[in-house]
Image (tube, rainbow, N blue to C red):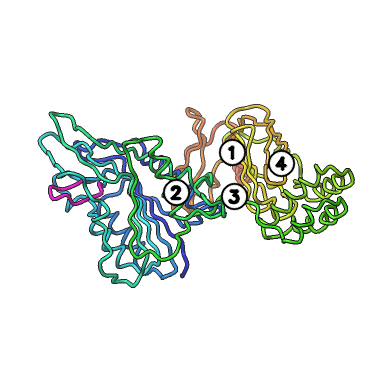
Amino acid sequence: MANRRLALVVAVDSYSHAGLRQLAAPAADADALAEVLGDADLGAFDVDVLRNPTSTAVAERVDDLLADRDPGDLVVLHFSCHGLLDPRGELYLAATNTTPDRLPSTAVDAALVNRLMRRSRAGQVVLFLDCCYGGAFERGVIPRAGGAVDIGGQFTAESRFGGGYGRVVVTASSATEYAFEGLEPVEFDRAQPSVFTGALTEGLRTGAADLDGDGQVTLAELYDYVHRRVKTLCPQQTPSKWEFELQGEVRIARNPNRRVRPGRLPEEIGELLEHSSPMARMSTVQELARLAGSDDLPLALAAVEALRGLAEDDSRRVSLAGAEALTTILPRVEPASLDLGRVALGSVAHAEDVRLEGVPLVAVSRVAVSDLRVKARLSGSTVRVAWEPVEVGRLTARVTVTGPLGEVRIEVNGEAYADERPRAEPKVSEVSGALGTEVTRSRDTSSRGTLLRAGLAPPPPEGYKPSGQLAGAVFVVVMVVVVVLMVVALAV
């Protein structure tokens, strides 16, 4: 299928070799990045996450992802792991089975990733490397890099076997130099995976990386944002980017909190707004109200700001006309309050949708919540409010939608309770079908749990009379009584 958006996130924080220290951040960072990239309202990628894979599994998955692609496809790869250099300065990405002195056979060779990227027919391939360079090796193994390591130089564009174009490599650090002293490594560049990937996630999730405010986060904007953010948080770390045959912009995500800058009003309206005659200025009100409802959002915002100016005009007639026009374009929500009802602890998050009504400009809004237990997101003209209770009690919260036309509020109420009802027992038919054998249910009085046993069932507990066996039990009792009476009669 053409024009697909595919992403592979590889997170390795656990290593079988004692000489490689375990990492704390990759798993959490991978979860956060995968969530943002996979969000239909943000990245809209089909995301696959590999957690602590072997080097072979990584190579096979990258090969599968990049093979059989189309020129319209965008593929994003993200690695969060140790980055290791062999004595020749060649880069390897550590997997869970990596042995530091056997990198070619136990780690992922960056040269292999490079070849797979170049051979792919995908139109655009982006590689993010969030590597902890200079990871701790076991005692006695002392690899050294002769000065700064040119990571980008290991990803070249040479020949384009697959006919694709647009390859970009973004790394958490520009270069690394490291050595060992005694038992402990001395790291001159302490890569912080959570800083780099955290900045990526933050920029996409909040829309802060949409530097030009056009509603789209391009790769160039994302890199600029991440570079500034990382340098602020960790001055000794410098993200870097290399581009090979890149054509056009790489659109990574939408901005969930799009900002719009005012455009330019038609010249004749601008002249009337500056006119000394109140009647001339008031003549623009109707046309400005029409433009405020335009799909051209910069133009609509310019019209709204002009109406606000008229609402403060020195002429009372003009100001009243401007204020009245503004009221016709104010945003509205339907319903204005949500009663989420009674929700059991531990249940799936309860969600409701609220319709945001008004001119197209209302879609350029931000959503905030007064209670962190409540999650809210604006998608188009719909505000989705979700609540997953974590404690018993009443919920009283407010969701505020703020945009160029002002703000509206949604009152949210609910009640969380502890569900003490016993969990539903599996049906015999369902269990027998799964096990492929006859299954009988019995009650284990010692654990008060439900036991499923195959074959002969144990005796039922006292008082237990399955309705299906009642007739048979009565028949047996009657027969016993008849036999006793016959024996007594013969004896007499």
Front of the two marks 2 and 3? 3
Quarter holding residue 145: top left
The residue carrying mark 1 is: 347
First reached walking from the N terminus: tag 1 or tag 4: 1
Viewer-nearest residue: 25 or 289: 289
Instruction: Label the magenta part by its dominant secondary structure.
Output: loop
Viewer-nearest residue: 307 or 387: 307
The residue carrying mark 3 is: 258
Q: Amino acid at mark 2?
A: Ala
**Number of the label disc, if any, that sits on residue 407:** 4
First reached walking from the N terminus: tag 4 or tag 2: 2
Q: Residue at x 69, y 30 (%)?
A: 396
First reached walking from the N terminus: tag 2 or tag 3: 2
First reached walking from the N terminus: tag 2 or tag 1: 2
Viewer-nearest residue: 181 or 301: 301
**Residue 445 location, x and y as percent?**
50, 29
**Number of the label disc, if any, that sits on residue 130:** none
- Magenta run includes residue 175: no
First reached walking from the N terminus: tag 3 or tag 4: 3
**Residue 28 location, x and y as percent?**
41, 39
Magenta region, residue range = 85-94
Number of other residues with Cα within 10 Å of mark 2, as a class: few under 14, some 14 to 19, many 20 or more: many
Q: CA distance from mark 3 to mark 4?
A: 15 Å
